[in-house]
Image: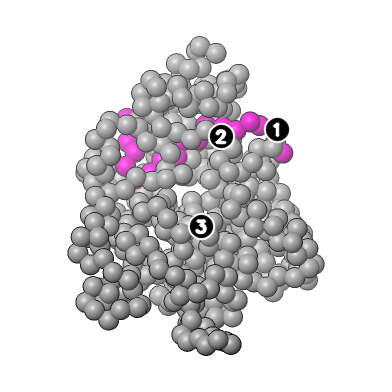
């Protein structure tokens, strides 16, 4: 046990775990603690109202709670100003907001990696089709780790933007953001980081890493669905064009013109998911109380136990791991295939036998799988409430499946 980290105590905070499931699909969606559920109900039961419109006490309470949530997120990532935190629906919306607000033109270059989620691939391919921007792909090393030399060779004086995943949802590999940031800024380009898989699991300091924009989702870090964040440096957000406009995005308007709101409202169009945002703030408070570093160590322990328990089958080639062999390079993700079996069938067998819930398929990284000629994988992704016994049970069930092949 990690000093001060009591997984059995943590599990009591998650009502759904009373169903005796083994939930290993956290890279897709995390479970929700009772404190977050209660915070959602608090909004609906006690002060359901709009923010930024009315002057009554309910509205003032909503505004106060939303600002508290914004400040909590700012503390989590160490933003300089709480106004640098823009609330969105998810990482996908955050990335699209930036892609469509940059004002990129024909010939401008954007660099991404070969392991990007569709959310950080399709927006750029869309701009390639519509505006003629150039999309460059930074190839990874053979073991799926980041290749800084390949990346640096791609940058030219036409490179305007670099958008890379921090921790891959495919294999759990963490990219060297600090080094990527130095190279990017040395070449006068801007850097955006997809933090959907890093923020819930590892400490991210936007100022130390010198990140220009950071995107992440609430639903992967104990928060409500339909909540996300776009962080941006204040001076950059103020210069950006608006993507979605309407209510709350303007200070004043007439029949000929309008005056744009200040950040963050400049980008938060229309009535927001106030309950979700307030619940998101509670989720951040919960994570900070447990300690992100404690969570990271716990997940690595779970992955280590799984990997070690199946090491002989991996060595024999009966199980193929996607990503590096070293556990410490894959964080809490164990993405694998059993030789001779379809990944979806494996996932179904795991649930039918011991209620082990995993993810099977291409994990929205179709481009990587298609290039490799692989039809997907089974992905196990651990989080703060998973136990060592669950890891052992999973490994035992995989052994049983291997025997019947």
Q: As rendered, which of 252 and 344 lies closer to the eye?
A: 252
Percent coordinates x, y for residue 171 in the rendering: 55, 41
Q: Is residue 16 above or below residue 38?
A: above
- Residue 229 falls left or right of residue 61: right
**Residue drawn at point x = 64 percent, y = 41 percent:** 366
The image's mark for residue 319 is none
Mark 2, secondary structure of its residue: strand
Mark 3, secondary structure of its residue: helix
Q: Are marks 1 and 2 in contact (CB under 8 Å)?
A: no
Q: Are marks 2 and 3 in contact (CB under 8 Å)?
A: no
Percent coordinates x, y for residue 49 in the rendering: 28, 69
| Distance of label 1 from label 2 (alpha carbons) | 13 Å
Percent coordinates x, y for residue 139 in the rendering: 71, 49
Residue 356's image quarter? top left
Q: Residues within 10 Å of mark 1 (few under 14, many from 20)?
A: few
**Residue drawn at point x = 40 percent, y = 26 percent:** 351
Q: Which residue is under mark 2?
A: 361
Whether the magenta-drawn stretch holds residue 382 is answered as yes
Q: Which residue is under mark 1?
A: 373
Name the front one of labels 1 and 2: 2
Q: Residues within 10 Å of mark 3 (few under 14, many from 20)?
A: many
Residue 357 can be seen in this image: yes
Percent coordinates x, y for residue 345 in the rendering: 52, 23
Magenta stretch: give its range: 371-389
| Distance of label 3 from label 1 (alpha carbons) | 28 Å
- Residue 325 falls left or right of residue 29: right
Look at the image and tell me in which quarter the C terminus lies.
top right
Q: Is residue 394 above or below residue 38?
A: above
Mark 1, secondary structure of its residue: loop
Q: Which residue is under mark 3?
A: 91
């Amino acid at each position: 046990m990690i000093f001060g980290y009591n997984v059995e105590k943590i599990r009591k905070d998650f009502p759904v775990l009373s169903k005796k499931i083994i939930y290993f699909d956290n890279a897709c969606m995390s479970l929700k603690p009772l404190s977050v559920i209660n915070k959602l109900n608090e909004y609906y039961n006690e002060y359901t109202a709009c923010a930024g419109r009315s002057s009554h006490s309910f509205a003032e309470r909503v505004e106060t709670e939303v600002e508290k949530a914004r400040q909590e997120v700012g503390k989590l990532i160490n933003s300089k100003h709480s106004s640098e935190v823009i609330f969105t629906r998810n990482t996908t919306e955050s990335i699209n907001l930036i892609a469509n607000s940059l004002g990129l033109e024909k010939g401008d270059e954007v660099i991404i990696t070969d392991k990007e989620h569709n959310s950080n691939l399709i927006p750029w391919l869309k701009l390639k089709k519509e505006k003629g921007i150039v999309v460059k792909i930074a190839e990874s090393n053979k073991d799926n780790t980041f290749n800084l030399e390949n990346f640096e060779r791609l940058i030219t004086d036409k490179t305007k933007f670099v958008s890379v995943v921090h921790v891959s949802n495919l294999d759990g590999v963490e990219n060297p953001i600090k080094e990527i940031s130095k190279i990017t800024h040395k070449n006068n380009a801007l850097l955006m980081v997809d933090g959907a898989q890093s923020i819930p699991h590892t400490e991210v300091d936007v100022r130390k890493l010198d990140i220009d924009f950071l995107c992440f989702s609430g639903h992967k870090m104990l928060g409500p669905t339909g909540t996300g964040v776009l962080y941006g440096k204040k001076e950059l957000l103020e210069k950006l064009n608006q993507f979605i406009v309407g209510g709350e995005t303007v200070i004043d308007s007439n029949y000929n013109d309008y005056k744009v709101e200040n950040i963050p409202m400049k980008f938060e169009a229309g009535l927001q998911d106030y309950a979700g945002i307030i619940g998101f703030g509670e989720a951040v408070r919960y994570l900070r109380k447990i300690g992100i570093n404690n969570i990271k160590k716990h997940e690595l322990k779970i992955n280590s136990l799984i990997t070690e328990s199946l090491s002989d089958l991996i060595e024999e080639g009966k199980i193929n791991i996607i990503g590096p062999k070293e556990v410490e390079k894959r964080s809490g993700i164990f993405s694998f295939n059993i030789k001779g079996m379809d990944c979806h069938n494996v996932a179904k067998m795991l649930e039918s036998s011991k209620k082990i819930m995993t993810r099977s398929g291409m994990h929205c990284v179709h481009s990587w799988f298609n290039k490799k000629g692989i039809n997907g994988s089974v992905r196990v992704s651990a989080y703060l409430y998973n136990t060592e016994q669950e890891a052992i049970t999973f490994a035992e069930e995989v052994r049983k499946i291997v025997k019947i092949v």
